[in-house]
């Protein structure tokens, strides 16, 4: 057994190095790309009526008059000290602001993802096992439709039905005191979570269905059944572990896209999360906020991928073998 | 001694009677005023979230909406009807040469922190706006101030390098801040009827009644500004009773769901927001007055306004809205007339028209207006190439670099005709007569003189077709029917909340 633990550790370390390198490259690409956008952060601070002297003073104060290379070095220097700086426009700490916004975006992402799993896994298995029946077919068609729907459109549709027509739920917004007011915050989360979950569930369902179909047709299920197992027993005993390997990497990707979907949905429901912070920062060329949100989002997505890779190796001994060979 | 107790009884009886009478009158008053809840929370929906809480640090128009008159007061106030009234200045005197203003401060005013208002606070507050690092767009209009003296705690003396008839008006933008408060980007210390209770970025800002306020107490207990990034979401919030008022409706299509519904009140006030096609008057062919007049005449502005706002909004013949004292009806100067537009173009040497690029901000209504202009101008042989840019690019490319042929922009400020007196302004209009009239109007000795000079300047810019003033936006406030007493004009984006009443 200790023999087996070592390659996993080596793999983890190697994967961690890759993660850090990816993050560094992402930071560099983000930095350069953002500076290629036309516009100047000084503009967000000044309105019509500002004098050229005021504009020059604002640029000097923000450092946007410095050469790009020295701006980047300064940025890297602060980044390694986990200092994301302060916003050009609001003068608030970027990290503190991201923390506040995470209180909306993370619950929205996780709850949306969880609900998507709850919807997609049973329905996906049913759609595969009962693929020859009318309801198996119906599930497939509806999920196909779900993939075609843009997430913001679904959000608007749900608002029209549940908020405006039925008056069951609020059309958007989040309480001023956030989760200190848990009832109101939770009610405000219902429609956004549902929106994210339905869209993600539609695409997850198709993966679950495909993976289940693969498992059903596999040799080991046939063998297990030939040895006298019932269909359900064979599926549960052999199918879940085998079928979950491709699903885990898909889940990693889907969790990342849930996060991105949450960012879009926040705008529809006026939620003070990372998405609204990102959009505002783009409009204002507020580089510290913009870089902060993007680098934290990138880190989250990379971490999800990292966790999915590790989990896959823990579940599937064959991949562990391959990892040992490579190490 | 024996008289004492009986007197005391008499006094007590008298007091009791008086109290009873007072109670009766209070309860009578309460019965009459029972129509509203004096501790109500007024929920105001807005699209303009302030970026920080300091109006000299690039906070945006949202901070005027939330804080002017509500949290901070100034020596003067620009009221919702457009007049300038003293607030923290109890009285002021102007020397005969117009160069020395002596202000006497109101007594009994305290900041929210509990400190009393003194002359030093006023001096500190004015210097905050004129400071080198200030990002106030009003900084330039206070540039004639050469000295601020504080002979005693209640007196402020301002000396000027030249006459400035708009000084009281310009001081209405200068918040009086406690001089002990250093950084007010995330907090406040003003003298207004409300103090800041809480602010959640990206979501809402709440104000609560300040019990130590020197003036009349607000007719509500709390004000909650709820911020939206999307007009549809804002409308939905009003429809579902999540907000009580929308400060400024920006999506004409949505008015239909409120107008004619007894649950809501739609009010159209006077706006100062002008939609204009600004040419770069420095470059050909826009340096030619005939070309500009032809372009003015070729647009059916009534049709444009109607297609965007229906029956709302106003046509204007120049940059001055009807609420400014120097308004003159100039809509007839270059009235819609395609044939004369063609003739003018031919006279100017462009019988076959020309082609130009129109830099169009990417937000409403500019893209729609650009397409309308494109189709109107094609009728006189002028080809318009629409180039869509972001608001931020607009500042860099057009406002700062003057690198454009023509652009669309909405100008929101009150009394901003003075921009035509600045040849370095982005549109580059340079008429020495107008420059002189506008400079002289500021140095005028009387308001009548100032008004006369600005009327003349206004007429000249219209005759010169300096820009193409398409229309004046409507200022539309929509509220739930049980909410009344809010400002309807929203001049300079202000939104005084203290007189708002909410019926039970």
Image: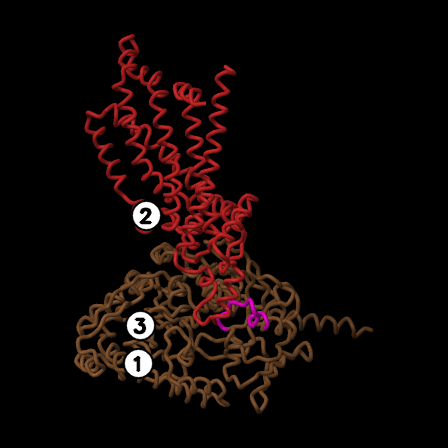
Chain colours: A red, B brown
Whole-Å distance between the Cαs marked 1 and 2? 44 Å
Does residue A173 appear in this view? no
Looking at this view, name the residue that lies furthest to the top. Answer: A227
Q: Which residue is mark 2?
A: A152
* Figure quadrant of residue B335: bottom left
Give a yes or no on whether discs 1 and 2 share a subunit.
no
Q: Which residue is mark 3?
A: B277
Name the residue rendered at 23%, 32% in the picture. Answer: A140
- Dot 3: what SS? strand
Name the residue rendered at 66%, 67% in the picture. Answer: B115
Q: Given this view, does label 2 or label 3 mark the residue nearer the observer?
A: 3
Does residue B424 appear in this view? yes
Whole-Å distance between the Cαs marked 1 and 3? 11 Å
Whole-Å distance between the Cαs marked 2 and 3? 34 Å
Against B106, residue A21 (above or below) is above
Q: Main secondary structure of the magenta part?
A: loop
* Magenta range: B127-138
What label sits on residue A156 in the rendered view?
Answer: none
- Whether pointer 1 and pointer 2 mark residues with C-beta atoms closer than 8 Å, the reply is no
**Label 3, residues with CA under 10 Å away: few <14, some 14-19, many ≥20:** many
- Dot 2: what SS? helix
Residue A266, image x, y percentages: 39, 48
Camera-nearest residue between A179 and B339: B339
**Label 2, residues with CA under 10 Å away: few <14, some 14-19, many ≥20:** many
């Amino acid at each position: 057994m200790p023999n087996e633990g070592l390659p996993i550790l080596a793999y983890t370390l190697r994967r961690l190095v890759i993660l850090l390198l990816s993050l560094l490259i992402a930071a560099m690409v983000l930095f350069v790309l953002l500076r290629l956008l036309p516009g100047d952060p000084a503009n967000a601070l000044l309105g019509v009526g500002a004098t050229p002297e005021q504009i020059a003073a604002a640029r000097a104060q923000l450092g946007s008059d410095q050469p790009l290379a020295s701006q980047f070095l300064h940025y890297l220097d602060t980044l390694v000290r986990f200092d994301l700086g302060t916003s050009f426009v609001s003068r608030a700490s970027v990290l503190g602001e991201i923390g506040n916004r995470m209180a909306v975006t993370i619950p929205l992402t996780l709850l949306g993802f969880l609900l998507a799993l709850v919807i997609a896994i049973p329905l996906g298995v049913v759609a595969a096992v009962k693929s020859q029946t009318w309801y198996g077919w119906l599930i497939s068609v509806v999920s196909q439709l779900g993939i075609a729907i843009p997430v913001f459109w679904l959000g608007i549709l749900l608002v029209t039905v549940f908020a405006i027509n039925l008056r069951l739920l609020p059309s958007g917004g989040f309480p001023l005191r956030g989760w200190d007011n848990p009832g109101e915050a939770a009610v405000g989360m219902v429609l956004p979570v549902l929106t994210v979950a339905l869209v993600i569930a539609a695409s997850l369902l198709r993966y679950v269905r495909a993976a289940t179909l693969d498992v059903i047709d596999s040799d080991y299920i046939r063998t297990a059944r030939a040895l006298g197992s019932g269909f359900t027993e064979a599926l549960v005993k052999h199918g879940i572990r085998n079928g979950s390997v491709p699903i885990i990497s898909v889940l990693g990707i889907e969790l990342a896209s849930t996060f991105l979907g949450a960012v879009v949905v926040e705008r529809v429901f006026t939620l003070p999360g990372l998405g609204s912070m990102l959009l505002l920062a783009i409009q204002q060329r507020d580089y510290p906020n913009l870089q902060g949100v993007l680098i934290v989002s990138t880190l989250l997505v990379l971490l999800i991928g990292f966790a999915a890779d590790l989990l896959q190796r823990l579940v599937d001994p064959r991949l562990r073998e391959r990892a040992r060979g490579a190490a | 001694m024996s008289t004492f107790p009986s007197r005391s009884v008499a006094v007590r009886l008298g007091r009791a009677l008086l109290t009873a009478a007072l109670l009766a009158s209070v309860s009578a008053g309460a019965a009459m005023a029972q129509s509203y809840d004096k501790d109500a929370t007024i929920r105001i929906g807005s699209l303009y979230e302030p970026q920080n809480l300091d109006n000299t640090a690039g906070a945006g128009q949202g901070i005027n909406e939330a804080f002017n008159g509500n949290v901070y007061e100034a020596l003067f106030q620009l009221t919702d009807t457009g007049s300038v009234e003293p607030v923290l200045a109890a009285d002021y005197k102007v020397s005969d040469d117009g160069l020395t203003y002596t202000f006497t401060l109101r007594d009994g005013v305290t900041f929210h922190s509990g400190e009393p208002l003194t002359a030093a606070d006023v001096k500190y507050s004015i210097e905050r706006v004129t400071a080198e690092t200030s990002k106030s767009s009003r900084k330039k209009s206070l540039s004639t101030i050469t000295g601020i003296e504080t002979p005693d705690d209640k007196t402020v003396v301002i000396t000027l390098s030249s006459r400035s008839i708009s000084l009281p008006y310009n001081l209405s933008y200068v918040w009086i801040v406690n001089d002990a408060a250093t950084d007010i980007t995330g907090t406040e210390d003003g003298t207004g009827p409300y103090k800041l209770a809480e602010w959640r970025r990206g979501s809402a800002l709440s104000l609560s009644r300040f019990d130590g306020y020197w003036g009349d107490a607000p007719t509500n207990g709390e004000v909650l500004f709820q911020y939206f990034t999307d007009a549809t979401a804002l409308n939905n919030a009003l429809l579902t009773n999540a907000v009580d008022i929308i400060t400024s409706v920006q999506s004409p299509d949505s008015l239909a769901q409120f107008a004619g519904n007894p649950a809501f009140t739609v009010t159209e006030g006077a706006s100062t927001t002008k939609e204009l096609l600004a040419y770069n008057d420095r470059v050909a062919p826009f340096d030619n007055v005939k070309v500009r007049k032809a372009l003015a005449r070729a647009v059916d502005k009534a049709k444009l306004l109607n297609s965007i706002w229906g029956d709302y909004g106003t046509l204007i013949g120049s940059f001055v809205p009807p609420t400014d004292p120097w308004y003159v009806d100039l809509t007839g100067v270059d009235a819609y007339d395609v044939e004369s537009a063609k003739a003018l173009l031919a006279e100017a040497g462009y019988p076959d028209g020309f082609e130009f690029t129109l830099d169009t901000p990417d937000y409403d209504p500019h893209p729609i207006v650009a397409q309308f202009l494109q189709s109107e101008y094609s009728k006189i042989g002028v080809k318009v190439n629409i180039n869509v840019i972001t608001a931020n690019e607009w500042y860099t490319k057009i406002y700062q670099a003057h690198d454009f042929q023509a652009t669309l922009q909405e100008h929101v400020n009150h009394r901003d005709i003075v921009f035509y007196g600045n040849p370095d302004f982005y549109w580059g209009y340079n008429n020495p007569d107008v420059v002189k009239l506008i400079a002289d109007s500021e140095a005028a000795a009387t308001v009548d003189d100032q008004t006369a000079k600005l009327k003349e300047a206004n007429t000249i810019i219209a005759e010169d077709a300096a820009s193409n003033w398409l229309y004046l936006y409507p200022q539309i406030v929509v509220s739930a029917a049980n909410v009344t007493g809010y400002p309807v004009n929203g001049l300079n984006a202000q939104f005084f909340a203290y007189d708002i009443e909410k019926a039970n």
